Image: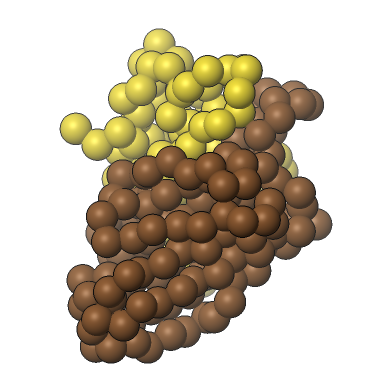
Chain colours: A yellow, B brown
């Protein structure tokens, strides 16, 4: 089983649509959770961190369910510029007081927003 | 703004050559990472370093070595390049101190990547 699993897509949606991506992770010791965005042939960039209580940043809402080890990202009112691959990312656990922790990246979910 | 730079955007090398990929960050981050990214396989961690002269193996260290002589610079070395090392190589950095709110911990910032082709 992969440590972080995502549906690769592609998700093809019209402009203005609402789209949701899900991700599951296997390491119950993970403490940090993120969504990164990666445009074609570019580096990943942090989209948002995911808080335990869930959080919103404009049109983007992230949720975390620790019991089910499940993370979600909701994009409302999709724009053409949202077309990209969205990577679900978790830290690999490790001691909380050292900060010497690596991340595990999912393979990504591709979103294509169409006019 | 965090800035992570990589020495080359594109590189073409021959099988058997020694290859150096350099990464520099200007945010005084303690942690630095090297990944490779291949279609369908996502980002895979090769090596990381949490301090000068310290290194830890990632998931796929075979065929690679690293060097961290200065805090801001982390080099990836392919001792004898092979065709299966053709890939996109990404460097990243992050803070080690767990200061600030928890949701900022572990955040990594990436360089633009080096697309390496080994012929």
Q: Where residue B77 appears, x then y in whole percent?
A: 41, 67
User: Where residue B39 sits: x, y (%)?
Assistant: 28, 65
State whether residue A49 appears in this view.
no
Name above or below for residue B21 compared with residue A18.
below
Image position of B106 (left or right of B118): right
User: Which quarter of the figure is the N terminus of chain A placed in?
Assistant: top left
Q: Quadrant of residue B105?
A: top right
Please tell me how many numbered marks the rendered image carries. 0
In screen coordinates, is A102 left or right of B29?
A: left
| Residue at position x 38%, y 35% in the image | A23
Please report the residue visible at 46 percent of the width from the left and 74 percent of the height from the top. Answer: B20
Q: Nearer the viewer, residue A17 or B85?
A: B85
Which residue is rendered at x = 61% and y = 23% of the image?
A98
Q: Is residue B20 above or below residue B97?
A: below
Q: Point out residue B30 in the picture as x, y percentages from the top left corner.
A: 67, 42
Residue A43 image point, x, y percent: 53, 64
Q: Residue furthest top?
A: A67
Q: Is residue A30 above or below residue B115?
A: above
Residue ID at (61%, 41%): B51
Quarter-of-image position of residue A62: top right
Q: Nearer the viewer, residue A5 or B108?
A: B108
The answer to whether A67 is drawn above or below residue B24 in the figure is above
Q: Is residue B81 visible?
A: yes
């Amino acid at each position: 089983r992969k440590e972080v699993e995502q549906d690769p897509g592609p998700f093809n949606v019209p402009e203005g649509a609402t789209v949701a991506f899900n991700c599951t992770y296997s390491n119950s010791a993970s403490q940090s959770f993120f969504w990164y965005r990666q445009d074609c042939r570019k580096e990943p960039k942090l989209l948002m961190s995911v808080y335990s209580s869930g959080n919103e940043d404009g049109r983007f809402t992230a949720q975390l369910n620790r019991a089910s080890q499940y993370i979600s990202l909701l994009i409302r009112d999709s724009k053409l510029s949202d077309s990209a691959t969205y990577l679900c990312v978790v830290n690999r656990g490790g001691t909380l007081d050292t900060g010497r922790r690596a991340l595990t990246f999912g393979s990504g979910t591709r979103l294509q927003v169409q006019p | 703004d965090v800035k992570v730079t990589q020495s080359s955007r594109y590189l073409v090398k021959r099988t058997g050559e020694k290859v150096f990929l350099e990464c520099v960050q200007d945010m005084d981050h303690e942690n630095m990472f090297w990944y490779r990214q291949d279609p369908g396989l996502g980002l895979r961690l090769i090596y990381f370093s949490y301090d000068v002269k310290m290194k830890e193996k990632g998931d796929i260290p075979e065929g690679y070595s690293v060097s961290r002589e200065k805090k801001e610079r982390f080099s990836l070395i392919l001792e004898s390049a092979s065709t299966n090392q053709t890939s996109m190589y990404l460097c990243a950095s992050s803070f080690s101190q767990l200061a600030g709110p928890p949701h900022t911990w572990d955040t990594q910032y990436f360089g633009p990547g080096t697309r390496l082709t080994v012929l």
